[in-house]
Image (cartoon, rainbow, N blue to C red):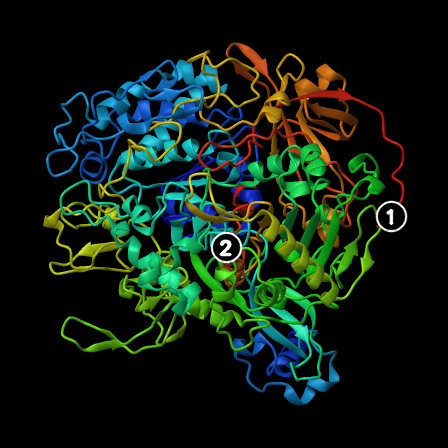
Amino acid sequence: MTNTWQDIKNADVVLCMGGNAAEAHPCGFKWVIEAKIENQAKLVVVDPRFTRTASVADLYAPIRPGTDIAFLSGVVRFLLEKDAIQHDYVRAFTNAGLIVKDGFGFEDGLFTGYNEQARSYDKSSWDYELDGQGHARIDDTWQDPRCVINLLRKHVDRYTPEMVSRICGTPQDKYLEVCDLIATTAAPDKALTSMFALGWTQHSVGSQNIRTMAMVQLLLGNVGVAGGGMNALRGHSNIQGLTDVGLLSAAMPGYLTMPKDGEATFERYMATRQFKPLRPGQTSYWQNYRKFFVSFQKAIYGDAARADNDWAYDWLPKLDNDGYDILRAFEMMTNGEVNGYICQGFNPLQAFPDRGKIRGALAKLKFLVTMDPLDTETSRFWQDFGPQNPSDPAKIQTEVFQLPTTCFAEENGSLVNSSRWLQWHWKAAEGPGEARSDIWIMSGIFHRMREMYRKEGGAFPDPILNLAWNYTDPVSPNPEELAKDMNGRALLDLKDESGAVTLRAGQLLDGFAQLRDDGTTSSGCWIFSGCYTEQGNQMARRDATDPREQGIAPNWAWAWPANRRILYNRASADPAGNPWNPAKPIIQWNGSRWVGIDVPDYAPTTKPADAVGPFIMNAEGVGRLFARDQMMEGPFPEHYEPFESPVPNVLHPKVPTNPVARVFANDRAAFGTAQNFPYVATTYRLTEHFHFWTKHALINAILQPEEFIEIGEVLAREKGIAQGGWVRLSSKRGVIVCKAYVTKRIRPLVVNGKPTHVIGVPLHWGFTGQARKGYGANTLTPSVGDANTQTPEFKAFLVNVEKTGAPAPERAADV
Amino acid sequence: MELRRRGFIKLTGAGLAASTLGAIGFGAAGEALAAAVRPFKLTATSETRNTCTYCSVACGVLIYSLGDRAKNAKSNIIHIEGDPDHPVNRGTLCPKGSALLDIVHAPTRLKAPRYRAPGSNQFKQVSWDFALDRIATLMKQDRDANFIAKNADGTTVNRWTSTGMLAASASSSETAYLTWKVARAFGMLVFDNQARV
């Protein structure tokens, strides 16, 4: 989230699209209700289902799963056509006026530079025209046909209301009502907030879904302001933290990135990461990358990371591809290329697409380790549970270790919430039996490995033997010490320009501005620097006071970066430094510095006249309507159909689906067609359950005890399916048998002239826990992901449904 | 009605020392009579501030446990509710958060390490030492056999891709940081978390 949960109350329009906050994030959603009551906000919901979020909306529009880019590109077209954009904002704070190179173009579904064999682009034409100083050329009058705003206008021209309705199945009048409401927030003192979740990410075009909305927000001047922003409602309690700390194949803590094979030396690695400003005088904060990186290496390797060994650069493993994400990992496992796998608090047999493939892949492992508070399906993949998990254990040679861990109530530590707050929590009790913390277990594995490498030697032991481990209790490092590691320290006395000591050796840093690239500072996660200082644990702060009750609460816990609560908040004021919305200013220029209720996302004494852009992480300093080479599919979003779709791509039939999505041959062979699987399915959560955990909790298991699907009344009538009757739901990859809930909340859509039915598949049931056994929605879902993130396409795929009889009574689970 | 209000004041006095009710400001009122009424169930508990383990709204919760945290007292969590001071949830919890107590005490909480041998149709309970020694041995064998120090071009790449790891997105950032250190020091690249699912 760019903004905070409470800040939602400042919105004039709330758009819930790509998420169902009322059911998935109920206690955050109450700020939408607050906006409606206190700010007369209008709630707009665009969703395939009439959800509980829709039930309190002022305006609901249905949409076919997987067509959000078409819908939102239509919104962009509408805003440009009606001139409902915030001109001064767009001119000053976006790249609308920057001039794009000759040679860039788009035709028949493809941008320039496509290589069909490699399914990738040569992106060299996706850039600005540069002047002699290496700065992007600009036409502030927007007359040049090659400036971004004009290319965008041309690109979205095809998304007429008729075309949007034809692709999305949204009735034109509803669609235009949504456009009208969105457009009202182009006024400088009005804001729209975009609230989305996995309804946007879990598509083969997920990143571009979000990007299209971000462009809408830039055109409306809604980024950086109170009640605005792009608000990704993160799912798990610390998924933001895990992302921030870089527990992803290609990531390092603080959004640094792992080196690749081509980056043989540290200098080569740095060459592509110290982004030079693309416009005069811009901040381009990643210019400090070297400070972050060197300080990180000092944090994890201590004295062993030195200037003369390039700060132990070679000890980081190098990637020979874009990343070993989950889809690639299970493809490799299927092919016998993975021998061992550790699942820490993660249940892939339930969570990953194409369950049959996952089950088969796990059986090829030599060893599987699960670390979890609960008895997960993954840890029992080898056991026969009947049709929900058929297996012949005698044939499975995998050694399985099921390790019991403590849970949230049994540890100290911090979690990063959706709005980037690091909140400390405290242990209330010991875990049950012999359960141990993840920290204790990981330390135990590490110490045993290190001991063996010390004694016996083995493959490249250096990083293992030199890993910094200066903890008071090495067997189970204290979370406070780990938090201080991430915050960072001065390793020598730090002096200012006058020679005065500002921090003594060993002291905790105040923030990342103190980081250096000469090995005199350490920080395990630069964006967290400031969370645990000499003043104490900032994450444990509990002062809920809120200036003007504007939803900032700056002294509650601590937010990254630098305790900033609203990202890009420089953009809340006009180029001269006066708030766009005088009733809800965030920061403003007082003649000598930026002041206000939040920490400026900007150098605090930079004069407005210097025209430094608010988007300080971008080399241009401005928001990108044209994404240059940052996205795999192209600098502008384009509508591609889901990999399983009931209709051709009416815009470009020859390029129906994401042309750069990575698809493994086995997975492609497992895609179904509309001929055999005529209905569109989408997966989701219920408000009573959290993924696959709460079926272990008695109350939740009682509230929603068994697997079911939701189908509309029209389709139910057509197929003779009764309310609560048994159905067989199948995709090319598998079958589930469960009850049907026949509902008015899903209605057929007219897509490309034909009625299209959508079936809802809640995803919570498996074969452990206290609820009844279920097959799991991932039995059906396809194994293909977004080209940028490899997030699987759970939200749009094809199925067939048939009435069936009740299955034989469940046999007792032999747990 | 009057009776109930009086009863409330009495038990507020009794709970003052140990519970948040003290914050209401009733002082010592009714303390003498407190012994005569059934004690408020949270009177003898310890309060711990925590965060809901489910979604990323990150509602503040208050955990109440029996036991005063003395060395030999074993804490037992008996109640969890929303934290009214928290600026986001302001005391509220959803149907999942309201049932946190049931996940803490779920009958399927694991209590000891278990091991399933190749071809076996059952788990057997093992010691932590057995489990961790065996895991470390298997990992070292695999790493030593499959570690790639240089690629075909002779570039130093130092990677290990034949063992992978998924990290928990309900674990703390401190756990995450330690996990990152260990996994990458081994050279792991097959490494991911729940951000995608």
Q: Which residue is mark 1?
A: A814
Q: Position of residue A186 (x, y in %)?
A: 27, 35
Pointer 1 local density, CA inside 10 Å: few below 14, some 14–19, many at least 20: few
Label 2 element class: helix
Q: Amino acid at mark 2?
A: Arg
Q: Work out which residue is located at the far top of the displayed protein and give it.
A: A753
Foreground of the two, A92 or A482:
A482
Q: Which residue is mark 2?
A: B184
In this image, B11 relative to A541: left or right?
A: right
Q: Which mark is residue A501?
A: none
Work out how far the residue at label 2 is from the one at label 1, CA to CA, in angstroms: 38 Å
Q: Residue at x 41, y 15 (%)?
A: A163
Q: Residue at x 62, y 56 (%)?
A: B140
Pointer 2 local density, CA inside 10 Å: few below 14, some 14–19, many at least 20: many
Work out whether residue A544 can be spotted. Answer: no
Q: Chain of mark 2?
A: B
